[in-house]
Amino acid sequence: MHLPSPLTPTALRMPSKHRSTWLRTLLWVGLLLVALCGWSHAQTPEPDNVTHNDRIVGSAYWEDTSTRANWDTARHQTYTPFQGALSRGYTDSVHWIRLTVAPSNQPLLLRILPIWIDDITLYDPANPRTPRTLGQRHPSTKGPAQGLSHAFELPGTPKARDVWVRLQSTSIHLFAAEVIAQDEATYTTTRQIVGSVLYVSMLLIVLLLLLPVYWLQRDRVLGLFLIKHMVYIYYGAAYLGIPSLLLSKWLPPLFFDRAFTLAAVLVMPTSLFFDIRLLSQYQPPRLLLKAIRLAPWGSVPVFLLLLADQERLALQLNIHLLTFCVLLFLVAALMTRPAQHVEQLMSRKVVLAYYLFGISFILVGIAGVMGWLPTKEWAIYALIVQGLLSGLIMTTVLFVRAQRQSLRNQQMTWELRKAHQDTELEQRRRQEQSQFLHMLMHELKTPLAVVSIALGTRTKREANLNLAGRAIQDMKTIIERCVQTERLGDLALNKRQDTIDLKACITQLGNDIPLLQRRIQLQMDAPLPLQTDQQLLQIILSNLLDNAARYSDPVTRVQVSAQATRQGNEDGVALHISNTPGLAGWPDPEMIFTKYYRSVGAQKDSGSGLGLFLAQQLANSLGGSLRYQPTQHFVEFVL
């Protein structure tokens, strides 16, 4: 007998208003599956109102430990009665089943499950065509009974009679039978095929739903579940006999038997690897974690036995390993202590509840098919129904977990990007701080030296005091530029709308800037109305005019011209400030508005390198622009 691996449920802590919705959905899915299974295996009444179970009026078995008894010997043995299905576990013995068939006036069919029994031989005294042998290792039957069970023809007789079935298999000796009328065979077989196709379709839907999620998330837990699920799809389909139903014309019976055995053995380690990955995130005790990590390697002797052609021993060891592993993983699940971020994705309480439910289900199923508990016919399908329910639950839980993991990854990515930006801003701030201190030390050093020399010299007192006063003025200008740059954001935010007399403003600045006195040449044909922030405009103009006066030829004039202009749908004023280059030479057009930039020629004079940067930023905040637009003979700025 081939059994699936333990249920490996995952769970997710959901908000209470969504949790009940998910539980109701899972409940309805479970009820739907139960209904489908019940419909697939429901019994069809005959015209004479005799049901399938009524046609088998008695069943009993005898165990042939020698495996050599023939029908003449077996029919005279003492048989043990049983009801429902018969399960005798793994054994080297041969089992003889005696079925008492009710009288019937029409031909009958004896259908025997499960499909994976190796050898089934029918002995019917009323049928001269017997004995006849079917099974997993024999060619499939042809005709209306061809389907997912083994079917024998039984002639109808006016009296009840006994038929004998000889059962031998390397798998678990599990036997369930029903007798139907031959004219019901097509309907019964079709119904069974439809139920099996629905089952496999649900497994495939689970796969198709989770594949794109894994493609996007590349979550290892989800990836291991998909590997396990793909193995289980073949296992579940082979358990029902679908591969042999579809491919028996092209492949020999032995292929399906070996493939089914291999799938049954593979399901356990693939499931255990998924369980290990899941439970390791929930931090079980270290000793238990080591134990569960070693558990999948218990399948190595199973594979070695298969290679040695010891199939029964391999499958028997496999089911004992399965029983041990489900108990081991249950203990590990009970003793987990997950971190908070794992709890947020999947609640430990819900995971534990699903483990308790799934493992209990598997243990009851194993006890049934091994014959440790009374076996019912539904036990043949209980284990694969559990696998489907597990897949559906996993689909729901892992899908929601993947969504939460995606949101968490997005948040972590955002936090990482923000941390990176904060680091860059901090580096830029420190770099700018360093540049600022370097500029301040460099530019204040010369004026301070001038003041020191002027105050320490006794001769030419008046000339020295003038030099000291000019040096102090240079220091004040540098400090004022630094303060204005630091307050740049506040200045831009607090701007007002004032009516500006542009001619008076420029004339006043020409008188206030020492190096510009009597050098400014203003061209303005008529008064130009201007509405803007007066303080910001004065800062812009003072920087531009001071820059022109400081770095121009001292014997030439600084030319300022203003005229009305229009940009887009707005009227404005264009102001051109130009001067001939002095000893500082021509500035670099690419760097001229960069913070702390000063041309090589300008560095012999005191300055902050902030004036043009500040002027351009303030011009932009007023909705205007400041451009460097030199001509062949003049350094010119256009505001």
Image (cartoon, grey):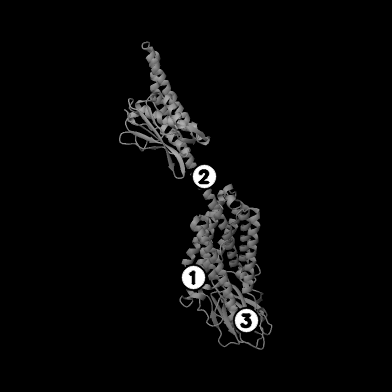
Q: Residue furthest left?
A: 632
Q: Secondary structure at mark 2?
A: helix
- The residue labelled by disc 2 is 415
Which residue is disc 1 drawn over?
Answer: 258
Q: Nearer the viewer, mark 3 or mark 1?
A: 3
Q: Indicate left or right for 529 with 581 as reference.
A: right
Whether 366 is drawn above or below 603: the answer is: below
| x 47%, y 78%: residue | 249
Give the numbered dot on residue 156: none
Q: Amino acid at mark 2?
A: Glu
Residue 544 makes an appearance in the image: yes
**For the residue carrying disc 2, how many other residues have a C-alpha within 10 Å: few (<14), some (14-19), or many (20+)?**
few
Within 10 angstroms of label 3, few (less than 14), some, or many (20 or more) residues? many
Considering only order in the chain, which callout, 1 or 2, is on the residue closer to the N terminus? 1
Q: Quadrant of residue 556?
A: top left
**How far, Cα to Cα, is label 2 from label 3?**
68 Å
Image quarter of the C terminus: top left
